[in-house]
Amino acid sequence: MKKFPLRLILSHSASPLSASSKAQFLPVSSEREPQKKCFVVGTSPLHLHMFDLKRAQITALSWLSFFSLFTESARAELGVKEEEIAAQVSAFWKEWSHVWDGTIEGHELADSLVENPSLHLDGPDSISAVLSGPLQITSRKLTKKPTQGRNAVLREFRDWPSKWSGGSVKQSKFKVVEVEISGNEVVTNELVAVVVEGDKVWGYNGRWKTHWVIEKEKLLFDRSEILEGKVAQTNHFIFKETTTGLLPEGSTADLELIEENFYWRERIPASFEPDQFGETGISIADVNGDGLEDVYLCQIGGLRNKLWLRTKEGRLITAPFSGLEIRDNTAAALFLDFDSDGDRDAILTTTAGIVIFANNGEGVFREHVRFPDLPYGFGMGACDYDQDGDLDVFVCQYYSKRNLEGETLRGSFPVPFPIQNATNGGPNVLLRNDGGLQFVDSSQEVGLANDNSRYSFACLWEDFDNDGDQDLIVANDFGPNNFYSNNGKGGFVDYSNAPGIKDGGFGMGLTAADFDLDGLYDLHISNMYSGAGNRIARQKWFHADKDEKTRKTLLNLARGNTLLKNLGRGIFSDVSILSGISMGRWSWASLAVDLNNDTREDILVANGFVTGKDPDDL
């Protein structure tokens, strides 16, 4: 993950998320414990969904090849021309952005423009406040007249950051999301992100529309204008990196923390089943009852999991012995009081199965029960769904078992089918707590056994219909998500085909909050935004022999994050585009929390991709 690894989206309006509302969220570039005793934990996954290679052209073609959903005539073309253009445009903007850091002079770029180009950017006198306070956000509009002429355009572009900031450009990114070709004329849409540092910190996010002309097989800049743009400004960074200062002494020399996942997978025997993509999570909980939050680090198979205890001084120290230093590949860990004795027990999803450990009250754990037939667990969620006084656990199983001849070890690339509606994943399980740390699989009994093998990453318990019991949402990686409404009698009704829910994507994370303050919990789903996917799926030839509904479904897979407004009665309305949250990059998880203390829930999105030794390599 080379740039912008975290995305912050601030809520700036308490008005309902309706058609009359403007965008409700603004990008700025531990699960909290939900109410009513519901808890969730994820895997902090880094999982390949598409073979995204180094060059933009190959990125998109691999996206197409992976989907295998286009006509024979399209196979001959494969959008090569569009992707060649996209690659050239990306290279153009990358070179131009060097004007901002002083690497090149503006006049060196003159040959990449037509004779009389124009640039229509925003000016300092065309702004309107969107959010005030320590973090200020302004919406910027176009100046009255565009700048024209080669030299004028180059100067305007060079000086543009200084019109909304007062420092040096530290990061910039132009992401091409649409390409239209008509003869020798080309129109592209780019998402633009710029970070400036000085006595303050500024962040720009916008969408530009650019016209190009192809002359003698060379792409020349003709004109560009800003479709929308916002600037965030604060006196300091919102978050500060403190990892090194918190970790136990000697951690900076600990190879298990320094070396990347691939380094260890080359050295660890396959019998440990180390996860190919390092999909292992982290949990925060007070395990020894001293009132301080401790940290448990899940690791790939072959490396010991680590429990770090927090001291009164704020540092972390390694627990001398906890009983949780297992070497089984562990995707997630959940620490809660499952036996109602006043301390937090542990449940782990490992390649050896679901394992439950009892806490002796002082942070020392003993294995109590194991479910070896459930070796593919990922995210978990705990809740007293049957209201009998103890916490039950829903486990998402991503992979399914394979026969010995064609066995696919955990963490290898999945084979979902069909890609937009896969049902060949592992079966999810609801473990009912019968007391005394005794759990029983009640999935079939309560109505959760059907249609529950959808490569599930995460789950979330919440009372979405305000009837006093906990409902269940499951995020699935390749297609529609699942929504189960609690009937209040210990069973569930499948509402997965309800409006808003059935239009799925690459679901990987969930968070809920009353974003519009109407008394109902709305739902944010972390999906995947793909520039290549958006470019390709919008082309007329893409899957031209299919109906519009199928084409829309495929485009939706690359659209990005989803925000569902809760209308009540198990009905949701998709307000993703309207609210401005869809472009969350390659999102894995999200968290609803009031970050700027204005009483409105904001959204923090963790995103990125698998990074090799070369930041440009996967």
Image (spheres, rainbow, N blue to C red):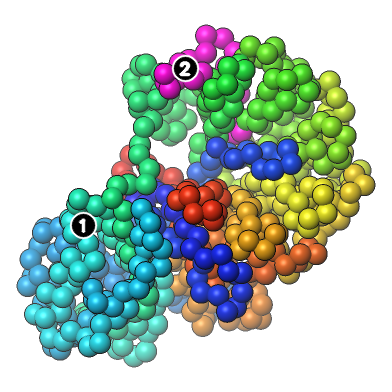
Q: Quadrant of residue 88?
A: bottom left
Label 2 sits on residue: 311
- In this orientation, which residue lies closer to the viewer: 92 or 317? 317
Label 1 sits on residue: 169
**Does residue 604 show up?**
no
Q: Are marks 2 and 1 in contact (CB under 8 Å)?
A: no
Determine the residue positioned at 69% across, 47% down: 460
Determine the residue positioned at 48% across, 63% down: 12
Q: Nearer the viewer, mark 2 or mark 1?
A: 2
**SS for callout 1:** strand
**Mark 1: which amino acid?**
Val
Determine the residue positioned at 84% across, 20% down: 436
Look at the image and give the residue range highlighted in magenta.
309-332
Q: What is the distance, in whole Å, between disc 2 and disc 1 at their CAs?
A: 39 Å
- In this orientation, which residue lies closer to the viewer: 282 or 422? 282
**Mark 2: which amino acid?**
Thr
**SS for callout 2:** loop
How would you classify the magenta stretch by its main secondary structure? Answer: loop
For residue 563, the mark is none
Mark 2 or 1 closer to N-term?
A: 1
Determine the residue positioned at 16% across, 86% down: 148
